[in-house]
Amino acid sequence: MADSPFLLACRGLPAPRPPVWFMRQAGRSLPEYRATKGTANILAAVARPDLAAELTLQPVRRYGVDAAILYSDIVVPVHAAGFGVEIVAGVGPVVERPFRTAADLDRLPPFDADAQAPYVAETVRLLVKELGPVPLIGLAGGPFTVASYLVEGGPSRSYEHMRRLMWAEPELFAALLDRLADYGLASLRAQVSAGAAAVQVFDSWAGALATEDYEAHVLPSLRRMLAGLADLGIPRIVSGVGTAELLGLFVDAGADVVSVDATITLTEARRRTGGRVALQGNLDPWVVALAPWPVVDQRARAVLASNGGHPAHVFNLGHGVRPETDPDVLARIVDLVHDGR
């Protein structure tokens, strides 16, 4: 597996073909996903290793992508720990009693991934057997993004409670993010122990903060999380939305690969990261979902051209696959990236 195109690219080494996979490649855009998952809640589906493994495998079978990503969710650890997080269809993670005071830290005791969420590692073990040479990417949420759901009580556009906590009680804010970094770290280490070949930290909403606030208040917890994985020797990917100004900080935190959204070119992203890490991305998922094929084709080729043949590149979207995306378009993108068709 060490010579898989995906793992070679993550390490900046030449691969026999450009690797490609898609964030949220297992999801509502696939008819087989909808048929298999049915009406099951995401957290209930994740807790069934046979089902979670099947949902992970579906896009690998259909598209021939170069990596699978574990079918899971970033709130699984805090849900398993009993904080009171549920995922509501059409809304996202919702918290019954949001985090407000220092007393709420007691609702986040040390997390034991094997004891509290053993089904995640079991899913990984099932997948490693089925995937063969295709590497599996484990996942966890970035501290800021997971905290945003706990503090806001659900998805937010303004993050008002988060900002107030960050500025008014910076020590409590830091303690919360460190606790969540430890949760993510425990989950990722369990996934790697079970066979995951790489990990991705989704700090999806980190781009909501000013760069100076991210650096002062969030970066230490991300660094803590990534440092705790350093001894495992696996690629550590960090991704977010609207994070073009944070790419250099992700590198400083210890990322081996940074995922680039569609707001800048790979050429610019490589300049901002100093060529120190591999890049992942960055085709606009809205283009893939809504544009006719000639536009998708042109934009995909523009991503490849911006990379300029650099070996340290994993082709992906700038963020997750939109639910309205035609699976055949993704299949054509894989063919284009692999052999120029």
Image (cartoon, grey):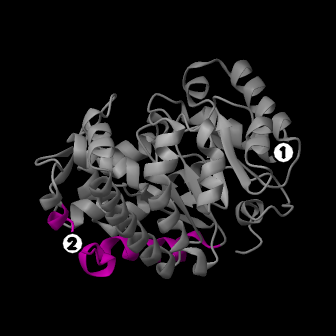
Residue at x-position 42% and y-position 77%? 190
| Residue at numbered disc 2 | 109
Residue 126 screen position, x and y as percent: 45, 75
Q: In which quarter of the image is residue 318?
A: top right
| Residue at numbered disc 1 | 339
Residue at x-position 62% and y-position 63%? 254
Disc with the residue nearer the chain's start (2 vs 1): 2
- Name the amino acid, label 2: Pro
- Name the amino acid, label 1: Asp
The magenta stretch is 105-132
Which label sits on residue 82? none
Residue 137 screen position, x and y as percent: 55, 63
Mark in the foreground, 2 or 1:
2
* Quadrant position of the N terminus in the picture: bottom right
- Is 118 contained in the magenta span? yes
Residue at x-position 19% and y-position 63%? 105
Looking at the picture, does residue 325 appear above or below residue 142?
above
